[in-house]
Image: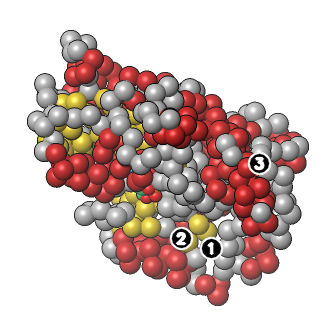
Amino acid sequence: MEPEDREPKADADARRFGRRELLVRGGVLVGAAGLGGAAGYALARDEGSVGAAPVPTDDDREFALDPAYVNLTTFLLASHPRRVREAIASHRAALDASPPLALREAEPALEDEARAGSAAYLGADPGDVALTDSTTMGLGLVYAGLHLAPGDEVVTTEHDFYATHEALRLRAERDGIAVRRVRLYDDPAAASPGAIADAVAAALTRETRVLAVTWVHSSTGVKLPLADVAEVVAAANRARPDDERILLCVDGIHGFGIEAASPVELGADVFVSGCHKWLFGPRGTGIVWAAPHAWERIAPTIPSFDGQAYVAWMEGRPPTGAAPGPLMTPGGYHSFEHRWALAEAFALHDELGRDEVEAGTHGLATRLKEGLAALPGASVVTPLAPEVSAGLVCCELEAATAGEAVDRLREEHGVLASVTPYATAYLRFGPSIANDEADVDAALDAVRALTA
Ligand SMILES: Cc1ncc(COP(=O)(O)O)c(C=O)c1O
């Protein structure tokens, strides 16, 4: 479809946003149990929200996405949902009106609310949650702060993202720890929970202290069977003293906000994620959660602004007694309006229901994978099975490189996708709760035109 053939903008607006209720209800989650049918999310939203009073904005849509495009790139950076936009606007207005008063009135209550929202979503103790600005910041803090002796080994995988590899390289350069990369599958499309668990089991050695993995690989869309991996680690730990236990450390960014099961219940020891992708939190927010036994093995790097740490400093003593999450939360002033609005994202997921969000996101990804698999000249790299996939969908086209396809999809069809930022480049989509089936079908039509 050429750009000029596309729906006139007003019609496209009506299709995507005309029903004032949000895309979430109108699209992915329509008919999903638990949303109360027609009552749906839009009505629930009107009943009130966490934190700041809503500030009216001139954009009343659930997502202020440009209707000229079908955006399938939530995995890069989310468009803020309405309640997050409103909370940010409200906090920003208060900060601009009077920074000291806004700080006095809001801190630490709103930071506590963000931490409590994260903890409730994870099913964890708020004291075990550190707030960060991104996945990358969390990974840097964890891998810099882990107690490791020279010769201790960190096992990571070939499938992890730059941030894990680079954090570990920097650490190894500093103090000589050993880092080993292993391969968990050869053909991503054929990845299976059993084979991945076996590959992990074969990778662990007597020297291994940390297994550094990514929940959903942004290189291929493969989702690790976290519970199975945790079981392998638990088995290896059985005969070990506490300080030699292997910690399962997870970059969870592409599962957090999709998967209904919490990584805490799945058995991670340390879980690191940004909140600004699939979770639809404010840009520049993230978390680190660790189990108490894991926090004992991680030292903070950046001084915290936690009240107890500050008092301890004034009294000339180390901050004993403060909870590890707040102590690991980097201090300094932040873009507070964003951090304070984080609780809104968790409240959104609560309202929608985590099972419904998971089913909706997986449903769109499955529709896209099945549609792509049926196209001659397209091959799907991400597995179809939900046990080993989430929302990311990677594929290859015979007719175009990933880069060419992304450009042509955008320029000729108004479809936004991306290229995987890895040595092997795939065409990558990520349908989310900001999308509906029509978006997936538009992407399929566009790919079909490219492959024809
Ligand atoms: C697996 C993975 N981890 C981390 C990141 C970086 O996330 P953040 O922007 O929150 O640091 C990305 C990509 O953006 C990613 O694909």
Tag 1: amino acid: Tyr
Quadrant of the image containing the C terminus: bottom left
The structure residue drawn at horizontal position 38% and vertical position 60%, both measured from the top left corner, is 395
- Viewer-proximal residue among 387 and 352: 352
The residue identified by callout 2 is 416
Q: Which callout, 2 or 1, points at the residue further toward the start of the chain? A: 1
Judge whether residue 365 can be spotted in this image: no
Distance from disc 3 to disc 1, alpha carbons, whole Å, reads 40 Å
Circle 1 packing at 10 Å, graded few (<14), some (14-19), many (20+), is some
Judge whether residue 299 can be spotted in this image: yes
Q: Could you say where residue 408 lies in the image, as x and y percent from the top left?
A: 46, 79
With respect to residue 15, does 324 lie above or below? above
> Which mark is on residue 69?
1
Tag 2: amino acid: Leu
Q: Quadrant of residue 145?
A: top left
The residue identified by callout 3 is 105
Q: Could you say where residue 392 lies in the image, as x and y percent from the top left?
A: 46, 52
- Viewer-proximal residue among 432 and 81: 81
Q: Which callout, 3 or 2, points at the residue further toward the start of the chain? A: 3
Q: Secondary structure at mark 2?
A: strand
